Amino acid sequence: MKTKKIYLLSLSIILVLIFSFIFDFGYRIDDDKSRFYGFPAEWLGLYSDGTFSFMWLGLLLNIALFYLLFSLLLKIFKK
C-alpha cells in the first residue's frame, strides 16, 4: 500500500514537470519578457531581468491534482 502511494506521488511529480516544460500548454509568455510555467496552476515564473518566482501552492496543487487523477483511474480500472 505504501509503495503504491510513493509510486503515484513520484509519477505525479514527473508529469507535473513534463506538462510544465515539455508540452506547450503549460507555458505562458507575458509582454515578451516574462515566462510562466505550470499546468493547470502556474508554479514557476522567469523574468527578463534574471529573477524568478516560485509558487509553492501552485506546485502542490498540480501534484495533488495528478495524484488524485491517477488514484481515481486506478480505482476505476481495478473494478
Image (cartoon, rainbow, N blue to C red):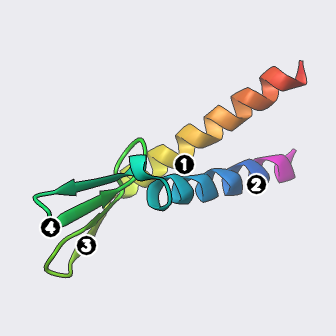
Choose the circle earlier in sequence order: 1 or 2. Answer: 2
- Examine the residues drawn in magenta and state their main secondary structure: helix
Q: Which residue is mark 3?
A: 52
Q: Which mark is residue 6?
A: 2
User: Given the image, on which type of amino acid does mark 2 rest?
Assistant: Ile
Nearer-N-terminus badge (4/2): 2
- Residue at x 59% of width, y 41% of height: 66
Q: Answer above or below: position of 10 versus 33.
A: above
Percent x, y of residue 49: 13, 80
In space, the residues marked 3 and 2 are separated at their CA atoms by 30 Å
Q: Hey, what amino acid is under mark 4?
A: Lys
Marks 3/4 in contact by CB < 8 Å: the verdict is no
Image quadrant where one finds the C terminus? top right
Label 3 neighbour load within 10 Å: few <14, some 14-19, many 20+: some
- Residue highlighted by disc 1: 63
- Indicate yes or no whether the magenta region holds residue 73: no
Near-viewer residue (79 or 35) = 35
**Residue under pointer 4:** 33
Distance from label 3 to label 1 (Cα)?
20 Å
Q: Secondary structure at mark 3?
A: strand
In-front residue for pair 19/2: 19
Which marked residue is nearer to the observer: mark 3 or mark 2? Answer: 3
38 lies above or below 54: above
Packing grade of label 2 (10 A; few <14, some 14-19, many >=20) is few
Q: Which residues are magenta?
A: 1-5
SS of the residue under disc 1: helix
Crowding near pointer 1: few (<14 within 10 Å), some, many (20+)? Answer: many
Q: Is residue 64 above or below residue 15?
A: above
